[in-house]
Amino acid sequence: MRRVIFKYSYYHNPSIEMKEERLARQVKQLKESPRLEGDSWMYFEGWLKEKSPQTKVHYLNYLIGFMEWIDTDTEGLYELYKEMTSDTDTRKKKKMGMLVVDYQNHLIETKGIKGGTSNTVSMAVKGFFDANELIFKRGERLTHDTVETPNISLEQISKVLSATGSYKIKANIKVSRDSGLRTADVANLPIRVVRAPLDDPDISYHTFECKQKKTGKIANPVLGPDSLESLRKWMNYRVNTLEISAEDGDPLFCVESYRKGYTKKSNNYVNEVVKGDKMDDSNMSVIFYQLVRKADLKPLIGNTRLPSIHSLRVFHKTTLEYSGVPTSWVNKMQGRAGEGTGGTYTKPSPEQLIEMFKRGYPKICGIPSTTKEDESEKWEYEVVTEKADLTNYLNKGWIMFKELNDGSVILRHYPE
């Protein structure tokens, strides 16, 4: 009798699937570490994508442990290079590679880890710097041209939007662009914050309060007509086609379909993802980076890295400031620790926020200005609420631009 040997596929081996599921849970837990922040983490996460689940666990464990040992996060680790290489006092230049060696010795002495295993620390740190286009060798200093956050242009944003047909992703990118919020804060937005413009299509501009996940500070973002229209399209598709609920407490950006098991493209094991759950902010970053690649974008002049989703926050700030909006008002919208004049410590009214946002909105989304006057970025604007302040500004040459319903006045002047 012919003997038949059954070869079980890797995908159908229950014990392996259980192990992969356990590793996937560990990776997910490690990714929630507050030490993993910003663009540098996004690039490292993309670099890890090609690694096995077990390698991901080891690299994340050791990198997070190393950062805890020197008390920093991924952005701080990236900036630490700049500090080390810019110090003119060579006695203060402790090499990054030697820091890694010190940590490896610390693990060997305190936890009994063998030297070969501790070398994974060096591999993890090297992977982090490789992903961020830094050159790292054990015991040697790093070399790199710049550590600046990559910028993005209006034209590049348009190309990224054209690279996707997803209602959700288009709305997500436009909300990130208009609001200037961090990726994690956009991911955590509930539907209630935009309920009014979703129910009333006549609302062109909308502002709301957002408590930031990273700092705990209150941001006052503003959304313009372009992002609100995309949100309405996404919500219509979500409710009527995907049949996903849209209650006030539901996440604004959610998972569109149930998933569990091995992904078709990357062959990675994915824990159970339920339709309608909150969209993970790390997924938002990865999707944006994939669209940047698909659109074949190149780094702007003066940048060495491709734009990331965090570049939209930088774009929001620089564009509004270039349009004459004071830094203090941009800080109010983004929830930064404000500086400058204009009532930094006073709570702005929705009307004030919207009117200041309108000054730079044409340049944010690329629509024509409503008046010829607004096309000049030379104008500087300010909002005053007290009569004494109004008199003071008028005496300095400022002119009244618009009186608001709440009694405050928008002033402007043309700097010499």
Image: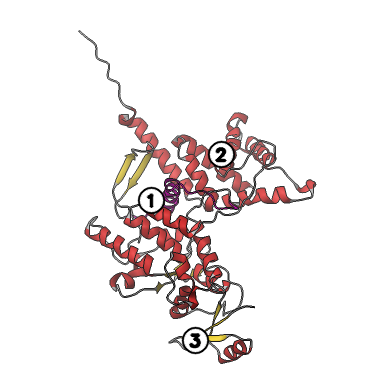
Q: Give the Cα distance between marks 3 and 1.
A: 43 Å
Mark 3 lies on a secondary structure that is loop
Residue 277 lies in quadrant:
bottom left
Mark 1 lies on a secondary structure that is loop
Residue 377 in the image: state x and y as whole percent. Answer: 54, 72
Dots 2, 1 in contact, CB < 8 A: no
Q: Residue at x 39, y 34 (%)?
A: 19
Identify the residue under disc 3: 408
Q: Nearer the viewer, mark 3 or mark 1?
A: 1
Identify the residue under disc 2: 127
- The question of residue 77 being in magenta is answered with no
The amino acid type, in three-letter code, at marker 3 is Ser
Q: Relative to 69, is 196 on the left or the right?
A: left
| Whether residue 221 can be seen here | no
Q: Residue at x 49, y 52 (%)?
A: 308
Number of other residues with Cα within 10 Å of mark 3, as a class: few under 14, some 14 to 19, many 20 or more: some
* Vertical order, 325 against 268 (above or below): below
| Whether residue 146 can be seen here | yes
Q: Quadrant of the N terminus?
A: top left
The amino acid type, in three-letter code, at marker 2 is Gly
Number of other residues with Cα within 10 Å of mark 2, as a class: few under 14, some 14 to 19, many 20 or more: many
* 383 or 40: nearer the viewer: 383
First reached walking from the N terminus: tag 3 or tag 1: 1
Residue 119 in the image: state x and y as whole percent. Answer: 60, 33
Q: Give the Cα distance between marks 3 and 2.
A: 54 Å
Q: Residue furthest left?
A: 1
Q: Which residues are magenta?
A: 277-303
Q: Quadrant of the C terminus?
A: bottom right
First reached walking from the N terminus: tag 3 or tag 2: 2
First reached walking from the N terminus: tag 2 or tag 1: 2
* Vertical order, 340 against 396 (above or below): above
